[in-house]
Amino acid sequence: MKVLSETDTGKALCEYCQAVVSTHYVRRDVPFSDGQGVVENVLVGVCDRCDAVIAIPSQSTPVIHDVVKQLR
């Protein structure tokens, strides 16, 4: 598993821009799509064009899992 940091960049498919775009990794508070909670201060990949969260590195999965468990 490659460990990413806030200084890393990459490329990913952005569903909003409908294109492969450059990304950068930052820490953000990210709400769940159902509106039932928020994962705070998690590392995510962000589209350089539209600023949408478009990637979640594998190292962020345990943090998300813990928040889901707390909400149940």
Image (tube, grey):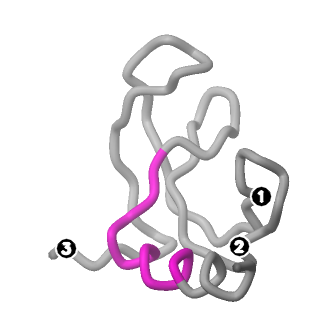
| Magenta segment | 55-65
Marks 1 and 2, how far apart in space? Answer: 6 Å
Q: Crowding at label 1, few (<14), some or many (≥20) Cα neighbours within 10 Å?
A: few
**Is residue 33 left or right of 42 when viewed as pictured?**
right
| Labels 1 and 2: the sequence-earlier one | 1
What's under tag 2, amino acid-wise? Val
User: Does the magenta-highlighted stretch encompass residue 22?
Assistant: no
- Rendered view: 5 above or below 35: below
- Tell me where residue 32 appears, x and y as whole percent: 72, 55
What's under tag 1, amino acid-wise? Pro
Marks 3 and 1, how far apart in space? Answer: 25 Å
The answer to whether marks 1 and 2 mark residues whose Cβ atoms lie closer than 8 Å is yes
Residue at the front extreme, as displayed: 72
| Labels 3 and 1: the sequence-earlier one | 3
Residue 37 or residue 25, whichever sits in front: 37
Which disc number belongs to residue 39?
2
- Would you identify the image quadrant in which residue 49 lies? top right
**Is residue 49 left or right of 44 when viewed as pictured?**
right
Q: On the rendered image, what quadrant is the C terminus found in?
A: bottom right
Q: Residue at x 44, y 84 (%)?
A: 62
- Rendered view: 10 above or below 49: below
Q: Name the residue under label 3.
A: 2
Q: Name the residue under label 1.
A: 31
Q: Which residue is drawn at 46% across and 70% down?
A: 7
Residue at the top extreme, as displayed: 18
The answer to whether marks 3 and 1 mark residues whose Cβ atoms lie closer than 8 Å is no
| Labels 3 and 2: the sequence-earlier one | 3
- Tell me where residue 34 appears, x and y as whole percent: 76, 47
Q: Please tell me whether mark 3 or mark 2 is closer to you in this view.
A: 2
- Rendered view: 50 above or below 16: below
Q: Crowding at label 2, few (<14), some or many (≥20) Cα neighbours within 10 Å?
A: some
